[in-house]
Image (spheres, coloured by chain):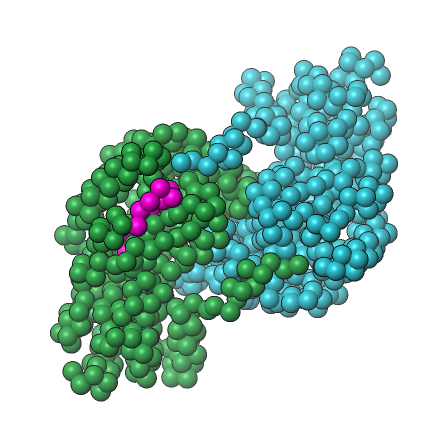
Chain colours: A green, B cyan
């Protein structure tokens, strides 16, 4: 018989998906260029030309049996070596190939990290606002995701609530910095304090608490922002990385798990990921994509457009009277709605062809997310609609 | 804390992997061309040139944001449409895009199929000899894999043992035809009889029993062999396909689940796969690889070498007195060892630089597997070693 829990999930449709579908449908009516679609976090700048050139060169020159042959289940050794060397150079942490597990994007990396350190019934804590897909990602493994309420002052961690919620059942903490949806980067102070709590609680509970650090936005940090490397502050850190945003390759499903070499049994943990992948059916990410990203590890797409867009939106939103913490990275901004129910607020915005996402599912009701990974020209045109919306609906 | 079950798995190393590592090490001593490595099922013929040309053309001409953008979690619509049309044309079953779920190779397809129709504790039956990775694939989902003993006369299904083992707890049957490791293709008679048992038992138990048909070797069928389309004989069939072998692309992780349109809730089942993938972390296979295989659906690599190799080996093995059922497809042959313990037999073969895999882990002790996806020239050279081995060790 079909498994009921997956059948039941069919009725719940993500708000983001619904809004994105609305935007597409509306685009067919009035031209998509006239829909100010801030719903989806799909990169808006092309992959670096070096990636494309590398792919073409490999396809033209390499032995196809080698190029398209099975990758070892942990990933291609030369690729793992290059990633480890790049991480060591950049963050001063002695990563080696044996600490790297190649994964199918951040989702694949997280699927392995959760299974590595939690049994069914164990708890993972995360902090609002959070990426709503964390719910199925964690809960379908049998572990339980608990969400610590937001610190809405600056969207750093709400430590008071956190220390109340952490318990002996907490096996891992899941963080995402730079953060989707807030755009906030956790400061060195925040990470240090978090690390201290985890050390104290690990000792108190008599078991390791792992820090799972989901870092797909690591390369999108704005000028002057303090953006510490999480792994440098806490030994038991499992870094989950994706090239989706930095290289504008979200469809190619490529990322990795990097186990902090200071973890007890660090190399075993990578081997264990290989065992986990036999159950999840991953095996390895595509060989050619592994080989190609390894050639452009120190490149990114031209990410500067995101900071440009952020500044335009931040200035306009604050001028219009929105409460809004200035993003330190990503391509998201997370203002407070102009009325209590952000769903109603975002519904009204649709009349002005502004597609905004209410943040209830991000664990932060009353706020909304704008994904400004769109052309700057369109951001500028959207300001007219935004002003009209605020004036007509809220008299501001 | 680290999850013990995955840690425990680290000590068990697959025999195939060990032998393959031995072959590589020995190759460094005497030149790999002198090691008759029949251990690994890695295709030995290149991907069709049309695939490479399509990849290069897309990389050169297409908008990179579209090309590398997120695929829908069920797969790219145009790709699903093409696959459905190709299946309909070929097998006369009215597949539509809504019945296709794009997956990361057969392993990814199976990971979704198992979760679709089994809850933890449910049983899946498969037939010896079988691909040993089915054990972790199934057991790590929480379901239980049970293996029906082999019919060693012709490696079709042992129906007597099967009907004894099927029970109310059986939620799915897993078959692999053409078969790894036997090389045998289930006949129309076998599939018809299997379908009848499943219909009868579904009625008797009052629940659907699904037939999960793992078909990565579907395109590698030899001249004159009866190779029926499984789905045509049983409504509740979940086809799991991979392009790994047909296109010689095992590293690129591309395949699909095709739900028989006659399944109750067929389209829902594909949607459910999309939900399952949120837990397994798949999301979708790489966009560019999806798009590229869709352009070469009716092509294969030049698979004729496998039949050539099979005939050479089959003739030699039978001439040397081996008991051996003639393969109908794949690139495997599965003779009976010349002594009771196939592990001892294969150990002795190593002295002659013949890398043969004992079939204990395939559920068929006393037999061994040869993966003849190697150059014909090497197969021919290996015959000298094979004759020497048999003569010196067994006096034949």
Is residue A273 left or right of A213 when viewed as pictured? right
| Quadrant of the drawing holding the N terminus of chain A | bottom right
Is residue A6 left or right of B305 when viewed as pictured? left
What x and y, as percent, mark residue B364? 75, 32
Tell me where residue B98 sits by quadrant: bottom right
Q: Residue at x 58, y 22 (%)?
A: B22
What x and y, as percent, mark residue B66? 42, 63
Q: Residue at x 40, y 79 (%)?
A: A27
What x and y, as percent, mark residue B110? 61, 50
What x and y, as percent, mark residue B4? 48, 34
Tell me where residue A325 sits by quadrant: bottom left
B31 vs B237, nearest the viewer: B237
Give the magenta range.
A165-179
A190 vs A164, nearest the viewer: A164
- Residue A53 in view in this figure: no
A293 vs B11, nearest the viewer: B11
| Quadrant of the drawing holding the C terminus of chain A | bottom left
Q: How many marks are shown on the rendered structure?
A: 0
- Residue A351 in view in this figure: yes
Q: Is A347 placed above or below A270 here? A: below
Q: Residue at x 83, y 32 (%)?
A: B324
Query: Magenta segment: does it hold A173?
Result: yes
Q: Is A28 placed above or below B112 here? A: below
A379 vs A225, nearest the viewer: A225
Query: Magenta segment: does it hold B378?
Result: no
Q: Residue at x 36, y 29 (%)?
A: A264
Q: Is A72 placed above or below B188 here? A: above
Is residue A175 left or right of B182 when viewed as pictured? left
Tell me where residue B148 sits by quadrant: top right
Q: Is B18 placed above or below B227 here? A: above
């Amino acid at each position: 018989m079909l498994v009921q829990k997956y059948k039941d999930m069919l009725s719940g449709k993500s708000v983001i998906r619904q809004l994105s579908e609305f935007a597409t449908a509306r685009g067919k009516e009035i031209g998509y260029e006239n829909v100010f679609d801030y719903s989806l976090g799909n990169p808006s700048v092309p992959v670096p030309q070096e990636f494309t050139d590398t792919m073409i060169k490999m396809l033209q020159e390499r032995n196809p049996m080698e190029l398209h042959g099975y990758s070892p289940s942990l990933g291609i050794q030369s690729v793992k070596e290059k990633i480890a060397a790049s991480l060591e150079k950049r963050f001063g942490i002695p990563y080696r190939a044996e600490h790297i597990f190649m994964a199918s994007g951040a989702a694949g990396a997280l699927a392995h990290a959760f299974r590595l350190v939690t049994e069914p019934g164990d708890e993972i804590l995360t902090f609002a606002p959070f990426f709503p897909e964390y719910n199925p990602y964690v809960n379908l493994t049998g572990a339980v995701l608990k969400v610590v309420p937001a610190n809405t002052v600056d969207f750093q961690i709400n430590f008071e609530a956190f220390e109340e919620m952490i318990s002996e059942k907490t096996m891992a903490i899941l963080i995402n910095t730079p953060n989707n949806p807030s755009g906030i980067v956790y400061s060195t102070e925040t990470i240090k304090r978090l690390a201290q709590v985890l050390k104290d609680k690990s000792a108190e509970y008599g078991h390791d608490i792992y820090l799972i650090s989901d870092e797909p936005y690591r390369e999108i940090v704005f000028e002057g922002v303090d953006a510490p490397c999480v792994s440098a502050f806490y030994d038991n850190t499992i870094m989950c990385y994706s090239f989706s945003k930095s290289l504008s390759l979200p469809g190619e499903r490529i990322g990795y798990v990097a186990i902090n070499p200071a973890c007890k049994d660090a190399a075993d943990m990578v081997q264990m990921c290989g065992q986990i992948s036999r159950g999840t059916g991953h095996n390895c990410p595509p060989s050619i994509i592994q080989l190609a990203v390894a050639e452009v590890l120190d490149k990114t797409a031209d990410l500067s457009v995101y900071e440009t867009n952020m500044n335009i939106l931040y200035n306009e939103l604050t001028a219009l009277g929105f409460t809004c913490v200035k993003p330190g990275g990503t391509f998201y901004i997370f203002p407070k709605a102009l009325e209590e129910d952000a769903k109603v607020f975002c519904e009204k915005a649709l009349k002005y062809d502004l597609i905004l996402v209410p943040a209830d599912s991000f664990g932060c009701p009353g706020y909304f997310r704008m994904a400004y990974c769109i052309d700057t020209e369109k951001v500028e045109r959207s300001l007219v609609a935004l002003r009209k919306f605020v004036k007509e609906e809220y008299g501001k």
